Image (tube, helix red, strand yellow):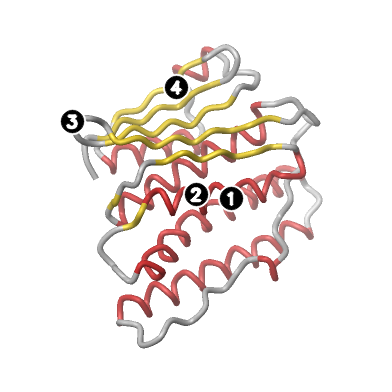
Amino acid sequence: MMAQHAFPEPAAIAVLPAMPQPSVADETNHRVANSLQLLAAMVSVEARRVADPIAVAALDTTMRRILAIGGVHRQLYQSGTAASVDLRAYLGELGAELERGCADAGRRVHVAADTINASPDAATAIGVIVSELVGNACKYAYAPGMPGDVEVVLRKMPFGGYRLEVSDRGRGMPADRISQGSGLGRQLIAMMAKRLGGRHDWTNTQPGTRFTLHVGGC
């Protein structure tokens, strides 16, 4: 049985307030962020109209990916710079957004992140990875009706770079999927990790599963 997800009401997907005298880059990020929020709202409306659980799951995944990318532009706009994204603020906001999407299933998303500035491209890749992992954990890590937590941790490393971990304490992942998973989500995660120049792995933590990404620098 597939976990139920609470798609946000269109009115609840906030539109960014205007800032005085924005630069061209600020205005662009503002427009892109609002456009992506509108697109996410449209996907949410469509998800409420369909009954097929496979279609609902696909729309849920699409909406999460859109929100992850839109969050980068929101952070760029709010910070007033087009050069870097504060990953701590970005992941905190993304985690809250993802939790709202699975709160009806009793899932909670906890984010603990160091202050790290990353390029917009790197932040987008990290956001897509986190969105995929948290979304999958909310759906599959715990039995239907059973509450559970998903943790996202981002830490600076002593000699440069950072480590991202996403973990749960649920049912765990079968050994064959740990070593040979080839679904679209896994492919997307691998592609984003490669884009970051990082290395990643999955571990069965008994209980639960932990994903770890090591990146040498932002």
> CB of mark 4 within 8 Å of CB of mark 2?
no
Q: Which residue is mark 4?
A: 202
Q: Which residue is mark 1?
A: 96
- Which of the labelled discs sits on residue 110, or is there none? none
- Identify which amino acid the numbered label 1 is placed on: Ala
> CB of mark 2 within 8 Å of CB of mark 1?
yes
Q: Position of residue 88 (x, y in %)?
A: 41, 48
Measured Cα–Cα span from mark 4 to mark 2: 23 Å
Q: Nearer the viewer, residue 160 or 73?
A: 160
Measured Cα–Cα span from mark 1 to mark 4: 24 Å
Q: Position of residue 107 (x, y in %)?
A: 69, 37
- Which of the labelled discs sits on residue 159, or is there none? 3
Q: Position of residue 153 (x, y in %)?
A: 44, 35
Q: Is 58 left, or right, of 180 in this rendering? A: right
Local packing at callout 3 (Cα closer than 10 Å; few below 14, some 14-19, many 20+) is few
Q: Is residue 79 above or below residue 28?
A: above
Measured Cα–Cα span from mark 2 to mark 1: 6 Å
Q: Is 128 left, or right, of 99 in this rendering? A: left
Quadrant (top left, top right, bottom left, bottom right) of the C terminus: top left
- Identify which amino acid the numbered label 2 is placed on: Gly
Quadrant (top left, top right, bottom left, bottom right) of the N terminus: top right
Measured Cα–Cα span from mark 4 to mark 3: 23 Å
Q: Which residue is mark 2?
A: 92
Residue at horizontal 41 percent and vertical 69 percent from the top = 78
- Identify which amino acid the numbered label 3 is placed on: Phe
